[in-house]
Image (cartoon, rainbow, N blue to C red):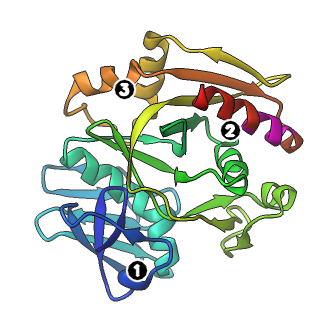
């Protein structure tokens, strides 16, 4: 069975889709359907068995727990590559909450015997940092969403999307098309372990130089609360507190992409220490 984000995926394309990899058979299994139509959603609605979401890219996502279906409606209909990344992250966050897991707007990589989640504000350079890590041979857990189950990060789709300037600087990725407002270049990722014990957090900030600061538990807990992928009460508040007790570092760095090699060097020093 192929999947990502703690989901096993059914569909005529899923078994051969290169952005997915084999996952455990006990992961919740959903059929993913793409339909064409205009279905704007003013506000997300999440219940115990159904969720209706309005992603920033437009259209709607219906997640039906009883029918085990994810129905994505948009104009035009999403391609398989678009369904998996970035659209699947929205459904993955809901299913993870139903399953009692936490999920975060974050990426992740593997170093020092575990996974490290990477958090940044919007346009904060998260994907470009992960791309630099991937080009250095570091396994990447996910680009957009980190699902944590029983203390382990779950693998995401095998791709990350870059803005054109970052793709040109890194000489990586291929254009995915899209609108002028959301032009992206896609870097396909190597396979990664399906579950990796979460070891800590990296928080990316802008600054004048590359510098690192250890974060305290209270500060990290507040940050994680803001980065949760679902605006719903935690199923297990104690689990969120446990996640905030892991090591965490704030990395300040210049906005210039030329600083990325030094940033990645420092990140790996901290993650492997």
Q: Nearer the viewer, mark 1 or mark 2?
A: 2
User: In front: 125, or 15?
Assistant: 15
Q: Where is residue 7 in the image (x, y as percent from the top left)?
A: 29, 62
SS for tag 3? helix
Check residue 124 in the rendering and tell me which mark sits there, or answer none. Answer: 2
User: Badge 1: how crowded within 10 Å, few (<14), some, or many (20+)?
Assistant: some
- Real-space CA distance between mark 3 and mark 1, rounded to the nearest whole angstrom: 40 Å
In this view, 145 is above or below 183: above
One can see residue 128 in this view: yes
Secondary structure at numbered mark 1: loop
Stretch of the chain drawn in magenta: 259-264
**Label 2's element?**
loop
Per the model, the C-alpha gap separating discs 1 and 2 is 33 Å
Comes first in the chain, label 3 or label 1? 1
| Dot placed on the residue nearer the N-terminal end, 1 or 2 | 1
Q: Is residue 77 above or below residue 209?
A: below
**Separation of residues labelled 2 and 3 (CA atoms):** 22 Å
Q: How many labels does the image show?
A: 3
Q: Mark 3 points at which residue?
A: 243
Q: CB of mark 2 within 8 Å of CB of mark 3? A: no
- In percent of the image, x 41 and y 64: which residue is there? 40
Marks 1 and 2 in Cβ contact (< 8 Å): no
Q: Where is residue 89 in the image (x, y as percent from the top left)?
A: 42, 57
Residue placed at 45% from the left, 31% from the top? 199
Residue behind mark 1: 37
Foreground residue among 190 and 41? 190
């Amino acid at each position: 069975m192929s999947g990502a984000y703690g989901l096993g995926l059914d569909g005529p394309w899923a078994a051969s889709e290169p952005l997915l990899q084999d996952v455990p058979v006990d992961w919740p299994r959903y059929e993913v359907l793409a339909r064409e139509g205009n279905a704007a959603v003013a506000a997300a609605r999440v219940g115990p068995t159904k969720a209706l979401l309005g992603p920033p890219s437009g259209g709607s996502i219906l997640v039906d727990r009883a029918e085990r279906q994810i129905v994505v409606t948009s104009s035009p209909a999403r391609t398989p590559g678009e369904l998996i990344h970035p659209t699947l992250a929205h459904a993955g966050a809901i299913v993870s909450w139903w399953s009692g897991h936490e999920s975060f707007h974050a990426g992740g990589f593997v170093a020092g015997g575990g996974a490290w989640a990477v958090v940044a504000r919007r346009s904060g350079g998260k994907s470009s940092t992960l791309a630099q890590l991937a080009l250095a041979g570091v396994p990447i857990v996910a680009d957009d969403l980190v699902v944590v189950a029983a203390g382990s990060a779950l693998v995401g789709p095998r791709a990350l999307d870059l803005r054109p300037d970052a793709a040109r600087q890194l000489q990586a990725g291929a254009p995915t098309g899209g609108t002028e407002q959301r032009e992206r270049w896609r870097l396909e990722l190597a396979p990664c372990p399906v579950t990796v014990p979460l070891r800590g957090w990296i928080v990316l900030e802008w600054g004048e130089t590359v510098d690192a600061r250890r974060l305290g538990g209270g500060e990290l807990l507040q940050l994680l609360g803001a980065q949760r992928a679902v605006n719903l009460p935690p199923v297990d508040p104690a689990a969120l507190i446990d996640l905030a007790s892991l090591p965490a570092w704030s990395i300040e760095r210049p906005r210039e992409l030329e600083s990325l090699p030094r940033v990645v060097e420092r990140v790996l020093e901290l993650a492997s220490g």
